[in-house]
Structure formats: structure tokens, C-alpha cells
Amino acid sequence: MAENLIKIGDIEKFSIVDLPSKIAAVVFMQGCPWRCPFCYNTSLQNANATTEVEWEHLIHLLEHRKGILDAVVFSGGEPLMQKGLAQAMDTVKAMGFEVGMHTGGYNPEALRNVIDKVMWIGFDIKAPFEEAHYKRATGGIAQVEKVKESLGILLASGVHFECRTTCDPRILSVEDIYKIADDLSALGVKEYYLQKYRPIPSDKITQDADCEKFFRDEKLLNYLREKFAVFDVRK
């Protein structure tokens, strides 16, 4: 059995929504340093959890999907948490696949190690760039300066990327979205998306109307359309 370069929680064998204009396999990597209250993938948080998907299973899958899949997207969890990420990316690139990644940008040094290997990144913005607010949005863990450093690395790289925010009304207000938009636009971000929060099973309080308030606010939406070359909502 081949050595596991990365710890894989699960694999989505076929996706047309995780990397723009590409058909991709999505590798959900096990482990995340953050504990966002709105996380949909809590099973992937524990880096020490036992998983059943071996590295060689991914390679076998990709071998049989050459000519069908365009790319492999490393998602999470948080891909930048795993030391074998760069080598895993090199391996799938050598097989002829392009590489994408989803990240919250928690580790700038790890991002520097892989930035030249990816053709696209989805970058999650959890809250306005204020330390206390960002910590609340990540379970009291994230360091906002590291997130900003990662975003700076991405902006300087020339790699195609998007920023996106999940609008959990327990954490964010409409005014917070204005702050995020102003900060991102000032830094030079061109592509931004708002994503609807759908209450996780433990959230017994939030109503759909609470989640919809961001998307019913035409003043906000028009503001975002003016701020970014590309803006859209995902519901």
C-alpha cells in the first residue's frame, strides 16, 4: 500500500461547481484549526480522526478519469493544515490535472509553498478584518493578520481567485458586509460572492427570514455590484 501523502476525509468524484468552468474531483482533507459556528463539515475538523479513504484510492480514481475530469480541488477542512499538500498537488499535476483549492488562509507560509501549483483559489472571508470579530467567527481561534497576509500573497501571485462570505446572521450584520466589501475592494479584490447560511442541525433558533435579510437588501446588493468587477449571490 502506498504511503498516504495527505489525510483524506472524503472525495467528491464529480463536481461542476467547485472550480469555475472545470469538471473536478474534490478532495475533502481531514483537519481544520478553526471551529466556525456555521461549519457544515464538522466531521472534517478533527485532524486526528480515523478516515477510510486512502491516498492510493484517490490516485486510482484519477487514473480512471483521465479525459473526463479537468482538475482536482483540495478542500476541507483546511488544506493548508497538512504538510503533504504540496507533494499531493505535484502528483496530481503530473497526472495531467489542474489544481484548485479552497482555504480560509490561516497559514500564510503554507500558502506560499503551494501558490505556484494552483490555477484557482476560493478564499473564505469569515468576518470584517477585526481581531475580535474574526475570532468569534472562527470559534475564538483565527488570527486576522495571518488571514490578511494570506490574502496579500494571493493578490500578489496573479492566481485567479474569488473571495466569498457565508452570511450567518448570528455572527454578521448587513453593516458587516459593507465593511468586508470596503476592505476587500481597497486591497484590490475583484471577485466576491455572498453565500446563504442554512442553519446547521444544532442551530434551533435561526429562521430563514434571518438568513434572507442579506439577499433582500437591494441597497447592499447594488453597492456590492459597484464595488466588484464580479459579484453574485449563492443560495
Image (cartoon, rainbow, N blue to C red):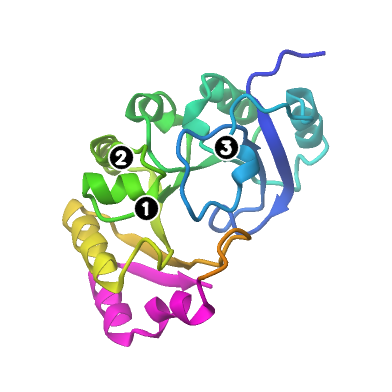
Q: Distance between the residues labelled 1 and 2?
A: 10 Å
Instruction: Tell me the quarter of the picture where residue 107 sits.
Output: top left
Q: Nearer the viewer, mark 1 or mark 3?
A: 3
Q: In this view, does 38 lie above or below 215?
A: above
Give the camera-side residue of 177 and 141.
Answer: 141
Give coordinates of residue 65: x percent, y percent. 79, 41
Give coordinates of residue 183: x percent, y percent. 20, 57
Q: Give the range drawn in magenta.
A: 206-235
Q: Nearer the viewer, mark 2 or mark 3?
A: 3
- Name the secondary structure under disc 3: loop
Q: Residue at x 30, y 59 (%)?
A: 190
Q: Name the residue under label 3.
A: 45
Q: Name the residue under label 1.
A: 126
**56 to the left or right of 216:** right
Question: What is the three-letter code of the residue carrying label 1?
Answer: Lys
Q: Residue at x 24, y 71 (%)?
A: 175
Indicate which disc, 2 or 3, sits on the residue closer to the N terminus.
Answer: 3
Q: Residue at x 34, y 49 (%)?
A: 136
Q: How crowded is mark 3: few (under 14 residues within 10 Å), some or many (20 or more)?
A: many
Q: Is the magenta stretch mostly helix, strand or loop?
A: helix
Instruction: Tell me the quarter of the picture where residue 94 sits.
Output: top right
Indicate which disc, 1 or 3, sits on the residue closer to the N terminus.
Answer: 3
Callout 1–callout 2 Cβ contact below 8 Å? yes
- Name the secondary structure under disc 2: helix
Q: Is residue 179 above or below residue 213?
A: above
Q: Distance between the residues labelled 1 and 3?
A: 16 Å
Q: Does the segment drawn in magenta span residue 173?
A: no
